[in-house]
Image: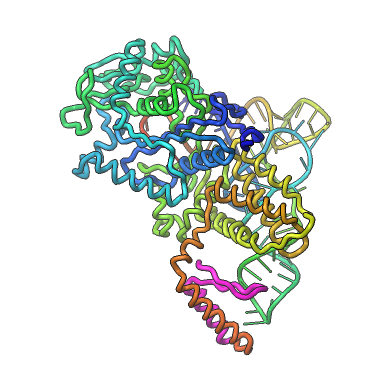
RNA sequence: GGUACCAUGGCCGAGUGGCUAGGCAUGGGUCUGCAAAACCUAGUACAGCGGUUCGAAUCCGCUUGGUACCUCCA
């Protein structure tokens, strides 16, 4: 029996504003679409939070035994620098500035994105489609929407008619906006816009002669609008209605609102059952944003080369830090907060390591079954990873107590305990011990340290404190900490 | 200006009507040649004001502060 049959997951649905029991369209299968990055620059840490959040969700659904098709796109065309008529395609602009092909820009930053996500130990999606790979489908859906009367052509560009759509449907239901209010509060109109109404948005833009990214269409050479790719690719790979659509909170309006409008206009029904939004990562209390300079790149964090943090942090530490907050809450990134997370993460990781040293007895004094069910209850409640982590720290207490002999565990329970701990730490939270990975390359260091520790032990046995303290202090200065424990001395790298 | 959301102990961060979240930091302790590490242990917080209730961090109203979206943004 699959785990999902005994674990009912509740999901906070942005569309209804309520936590709802998750019921997939097809039993045992989940279709999930997440809006991916626009690859015109390096992804910053804020971008990564969204993808790490959905990676955790993907992992938990898989852990429950669901067969998940996870589609996350790469936006490599159509994302404009602004909404004005002269708005330029972001990729195109970057290519123009650097005098390279747009596809070189796309390639460079797609590779960077994949590298960073791999460092964060995120699983690749099942399908990672690109906008440029689906121009034909986008043109087809535009024809469809034109046929239905929800779009109009103006000088070789096609715009979605929001007013018309709103007569038959409800524009703004996801973001809680009313079209009348939006019209009433429109800022000063852009002079001589092609749009009939400022709320209309582009499905297809005519390419000016100098525009490098262009494709032929029934309306002349042009390029697709940003919102359209997601409608096309999600419906192509997941169907006209699918289970979960995710993305960053900042995409809720207008991007996701427009996706709903396009889907309903083209297919006549709502595209998504559960809308999920990952909240923003802030830096110094402000949203991370490339344009304002208030952002940090993952690489800068891993190497320590940045102006915000006092040291470097491993990818798993950053991931753990993110998992300590609920995906739906705003999370502030700071030196203090990540330092605290690092210590907690190390303690958790160390405790898992010593699980192998525990000796089981006949009967358990700890209630592993009940602990385990608390872990699942946390995750079933809208993927509440902070509660799960609190439970994992309860487990840390159990582990120490069993090791000390103040609590006992049976062979059967210990096996289940280990399996469950590993499942949540490794499979669901996607954590791993980065330090083990580095010391594997450092086998010679292990040997050298063994010798040094032995020499120091001799000095201590001779009460030669001058020598033993010199070894300890100078190693510490070099970034190696010696830990004197009951069973001898071990070391760890800073 | 419009629309949302948020305000929790020194810091981070869960929790939506009665029961100790958790992590980090701090105090005390165990261990240790000393120290570090490790482990044990302690600490009753919910922006302000008013209301509902037997009872509110949790519900309602007002006030203050903050953030996000309304233009591109994960």
Q: How many marks?
A: 0
Residue pictured at 67% horizontal, 53% vertical: A415
Residue pictured at 50% horizontal, 35% vertical: A68
Residue A379 image position (x, y, % from top left): 62, 40
Image side of residue A209 versus residue A481, left or right = left
Q: Quadrant of residue A456?
A: bottom right
Q: Quadrant of residue A83?
A: top left
User: Which quarter shows the N terminus of chain A?
Assistant: top right
In this rendered view, identify the residue nearer to me: A29 or A139: A29
Image side of residue A305 versus residue B14, left or right = left
Image side of residue A48 versus residue A455, left or right = left
Residue A486 part of the magenta segment = yes
Residue A320 image position (x, y, % from top left): 54, 51
Q: Quadrant of residue A263?
A: top left
Residue B58 image position (x, y, % from top left): 69, 33
Q: As displayed, is residue A236 above or below residue A465? A: above
Residue sitting at the far front:
A1
In this rendered view, identify the residue nearer to me: A167 or A148: A148
Residue A241 image position (x, y, % from top left): 47, 22
Residue A294 part of the magenta segment = no
Image side of residue A267 versus residue A190, left or right = right
Q: As displayed, is residue A373 above or below residue A79? A: below
In this rendered view, identify the residue nearer to me: A479 or A366: A366
What are the residue bounds of the magenta stretch?
A466-494
Q: Which colour scheme is used?
A: rainbow
In this rendered view, identify the residue nearer to me: A330 or A412: A412
């Amino acid at each position: 029996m699959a785990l999902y049959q005994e674990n009912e997951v509740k999901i906070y649905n942005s569309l209804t504003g309520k936590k709802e029991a998750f019921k997939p369209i097809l039993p045992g299968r989940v279709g999930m679409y997440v809006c991916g990055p626009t690859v015109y620059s390096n992804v910053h840490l804020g971008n990564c939070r969204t993808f790490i959040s959905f990676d955790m969700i993907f992992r938990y659904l898989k852990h429950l035994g669901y067969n998940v098709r996870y589609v996350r796109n790469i936006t490599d065309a159509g994302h404009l620098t602004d909404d004005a008529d002269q708005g330029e395609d972001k990729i195109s602009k970057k290519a123009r500035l650097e005098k390279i092909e747009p596809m070189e820009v796309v390639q460079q930053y797609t590779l960077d994105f994949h590298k960073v996500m791999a460092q964060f130990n995120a699983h690749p999606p099942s399908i990672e489609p690109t906008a440029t790979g689906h121009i034909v489908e986008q043109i087809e859906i535009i024809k469809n929407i034109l046929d239905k009367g929800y779009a109009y052509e103006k000088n070789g560009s096609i715009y979605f008619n929001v007013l018309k759509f709103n007569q038959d449907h409800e524009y703004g239901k996801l973001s809680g906006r009313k079209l009348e209010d939006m019209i009433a509060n429109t800022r000063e109109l852009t002079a001589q816009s092609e749009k009939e109404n400022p709320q209309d948005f582009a499905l297809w833009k005519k390419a000016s002669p100098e525009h490098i990214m262009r494709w032929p269409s029934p309306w002349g050479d042009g390029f697709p609008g940003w919102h359209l790719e997601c409608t096309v690719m999600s419906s192509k790979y997941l169907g006209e209605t699918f289970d979960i659509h995710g993305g960053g909170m900042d995409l809720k309006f207008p991007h996701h609102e427009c996706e709903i409008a396009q889907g309903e206009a083209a297919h006549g029904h709502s595209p998504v059952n559960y809308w999920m939004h990952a909240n923003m990562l802030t830096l110094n209390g402000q949203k991370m944003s490339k344009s304002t300079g208030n952002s940090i790149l993952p690489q800068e964090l891993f190497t320590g080369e940045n102006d915000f943090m006092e040291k470097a942090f491993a990818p798993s530490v950053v991931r753990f830090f993110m998992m300590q907050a609920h995906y739906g809450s705003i999370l502030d990134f700071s030196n203090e907060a990540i330092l605290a997370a690092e210590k907690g993460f190390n303690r958790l990781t160390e405790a898992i390591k010593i699980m192998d040293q525990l000796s089981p007895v006949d009967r358990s004094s700890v209630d592993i079954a009940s602990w385990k069910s608390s872990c699942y209850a946390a995750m079933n409640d809208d993927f509440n990873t902070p509660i799960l982590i609190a439970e994992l720290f309860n487990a840390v207490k159990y582990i120490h107590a069993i090791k000390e002999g103040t609590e006992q565990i049976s062979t059967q329970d210990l096996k289940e305990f280990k399996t469950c701990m590993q499942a949540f730490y490794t499979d669901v939270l996607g954590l791993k011990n980065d330090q083990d990975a580095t010391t594997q390359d450092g086998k010679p260091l292990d040997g050298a340290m063994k010798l040094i520790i032995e020499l120091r032990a001799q000095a201590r046995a001779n009460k030669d404190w001058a020598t033993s303290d010199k070894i300890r202090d100078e190693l510490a200065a070099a970034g190696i900490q010696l830990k004197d424990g009951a069973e001898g001395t071990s070391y760890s790298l800073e």
